[in-house]
Amino acid sequence: MKRLLASLAALLSLGAAPAPSGVSMTALLAETPAPTLDVYGLFVDSGGRQPSPRVIPYGLNTPLFSDYAEKARYVFVPEGKAARYAAEGALDFPVGTTLVKTFAYPADLRRPADDVRLVETRLLIHKADGWAAYAYVWNAAQTQAVLKRAGARLPVSVVDATGKRRDIDYAVPNQNQCKECHQVDKAIAPIGPRARNLNGDFAYADSRENQLARWTRLGILAGAPHSAAAPRTAVWDDPAEPLAARARAYLDANCAHCHNPAGIASNSGLFLQLEETRAANLGVGKRPVAAGRGSGGLEVSIEPGHPEKSILVHRMASSEPGVMMPELGRSLVHEEGVALIRQYVASLKP
């Protein structure tokens, strides 16, 4: 998941103190979004591959699955300001902070650094009155990304990890869809950059370093404890980590942005964030609030020891609209993710 990001990070040199930024605060804080991505000055090059100074790459221990797209993530925090550490939820970012996420596909997923096509770059900008989300779609020449407020459908073809060709109906979200996934207490908010999901090493150009320590050293994060004393999200595809921790991390990243007490699916009573400890709220033996065709005729969200009887697994394994979960952000089934959750449910004691 982090291989493309690591190759892009190799373009950076972050060993010295940050240089003056070329980022346009005027454009970032403007009432209306810029028509093209380059107006913000977030990247040095027109192709969006070399970030400007103070635009810092980062990765997540366990990211959201998005139809096998590789993702390059960056954060910009205005000079003289810093995010505040929070043990739960996203970091408390100051006004002007911009979270950048570029979605890309190599022609062959087995060679993630070769023949890479950028598809879109999403921005989450902290303005004076709250966060705003914008999507910019890259042209065929890979020289410019244009604002798409109404979203878009883009055909993508890749060779997957097994050597099979996959044709993907890639969906660029419209602004209402951005609000659905990024909604916390009915307001747009970041969901990925939580301290616990950043608490891991990242391969920067000059060295490999824990991200919380790096951000603290660069002055863009304040109040963080030593990484060993901070909560940490497991890496979902690292077999060296405990199965339950990996599965909970996967559900947290892929489901909990809606399935939490402050999310858009709060009325379901199914809460999948890592902080949740109540078995019933995690779905164990829980009957759905509204049983429709999405349940597949099954009775409970998780039947311990029986993934084949669990609604959660059934919906994750579907690509049918109205059945599949998550319902936005993917068109394909994440086979590896479903296999992990099947294994986890099978391991639970009845």
Image (cartoon, helix red, strand yellow):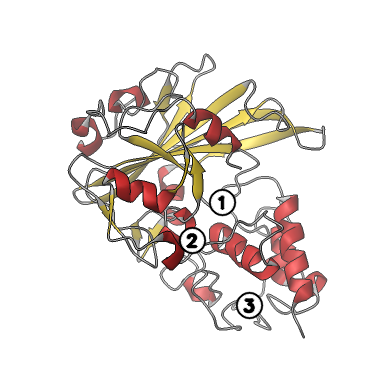
State how far apart marks 1 and 3 are (Cα): 20 Å
Up-down relation of residue 50 to residue 326 (above or below): above
Callout 2 touching callout 1 (CB < 8 Å): yes
Quarter residue 169 falls in: top right
State how far apart marks 3 and 2 are (Cα): 16 Å
The structure residue drawn at horizontal position 54% and vertical position 38%, both measured from the top left corner, is 71
The structure residue drawn at horizontal position 60% and vertical position 45%, both measured from the top left corner, is 66
In the rendered image, the quadrant that contains the C terminus is: bottom right
Residue 283: which numbered mark, if any? 3
Judge depth for marks 1 and 3 and give the one in front: 1
Q: Is mark 1 on a helix, strand or loop?
A: loop
Up-down relation of residue 77 to residue 242 (above or below): above
In the picture, measured across the screen, residue 57 lies left or right of residue 18, that is right
Which badge, 2 or 1, is on the more N-terminal residue? 1
Q: Please state which amino acid type lies under the numbered disc 1.
A: Leu
Q: Mark 1 points at which residue?
A: 64
Q: Name the residue under label 2.
A: 257
Q: Is mark 3 on a helix, strand or loop?
A: loop
The one nearer the camera, 308 or 14, is 14
x and y, in percent, of residue 342 in the image: 76, 65
The one nearer the camera, 314 or 6, is 6
Up-down relation of residue 228 to residue 38 (above or below): below
